[in-house]
Image (cartoon, rainbow, N blue to C red):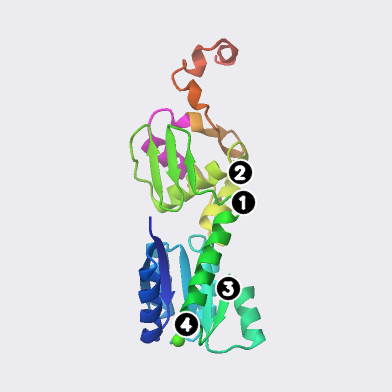
Amino acid sequence: MKKRILIIEDDKDIVEAIRYNLEKERGFSVRSAQTGDEGLSLALEERPHLIILDIGLPGLSGYEVCRMLRRDAETRDIPIVMLTARGSESDKVLGLELGADDYLTKPFGIRELIARVRAAMRRKEGEPGAMEVFDDGKLYLHFGDYVVRFNGREPKLTFKEFSLLKLLVQNAGRVLSRDKILDAVWGYNYFSESRTVDVHIRRIRKKLGPKAENYIETVIGVGYRFRLQNPGLQTSPSPSNSKSQATSVP
Ligand code: CA
């Protein structure tokens, strides 16, 4: 699976040099944007694995673009490597404070850039909670590629539904409140109500189909919990048939 890289830079020669070298490395596919606005919409559309962002752009500056990428729940986890012609320490500090992962001063060597790109992606993948794949033999999720399979089917989840399911899976066993889910999936400045979460959970369960409730448990008055299933128990009777559970079923 190729890693998608988005370059936001108005200097076409630089874009082409980076594109040529990254694509030559294999394993990378490259898209580019010449302005911040175009870059922001491509970032949402493509969900790249990493963004190479120039500070000197026409219109929105790279700093502003960086700030907006970090503010949006859908793009805030994408690693950013910043480029600039300016090499002063304060520029570098500002870029890093705004959430850039690394920083390169022009002129830079292309090998250096590729090494930084790889390092930034490795760091992201090594972060706790940044599990790439969940697979228990029945439910399969690939977080980077937005793939879901359940009981041999491949339900089509929207981006929000996928993000919500991913959050639950990555916090398996823990009860997440509706507020916490809203904050993590929709962003802290998203104006919404907890009912939004319920609606999305309902849609996820419906799309996954029968037995999805075994995985996504409603914790009344609080929120939701993802329960790990023992794949060895897949063929065992449903819980209502077992003695220990029967007493709690009216
Ligand atoms: Ca530029």
Q: Distance between the residues labelled 3 and 2?
A: 34 Å
Determine if residue 187 is in view.
yes
Q: What residue type is labelled 3?
A: Asp
Discs 3/4, front: 3
Q: What residue type is labelled 1?
A: Pro
Q: What residue type is labelled 4?
A: Leu
Quadrant, the N terminus = bottom left
Secondary structure category for the residue under label 4: loop
Quadrant for ligand 1 reads bottom left
What residue would you read off at disc 1? 128
Q: How far apart are marks 2 and 4 (CA)?
A: 37 Å
What residue would you read off at disc 4? 60
Q: Which residue corresponds to the image point at 61% horizontal and 36% vertical from the top-left?
A: 173
Q: Give the range drawn in magenta.
A: 199-213
Classify mark 1 as within 8 Å of ligand 1 or not, answering yes or no. no
Q: Which of marks 2 and 1 is nearer the N terminus?
A: 1
* Neighbour tally class for label 3: few under 14, some 14-19, many 20 plus, Cα within 10 Å: some
- Disc ID at residue 177: 2
- State left or right for residue 89 relative to residue 70: right
Residue in the foreground of this view, choosing between 152 and 18: 18
Q: Which residue corresponds to the image point at 56% horizontal and 62% vertical from the top-left?
A: 189
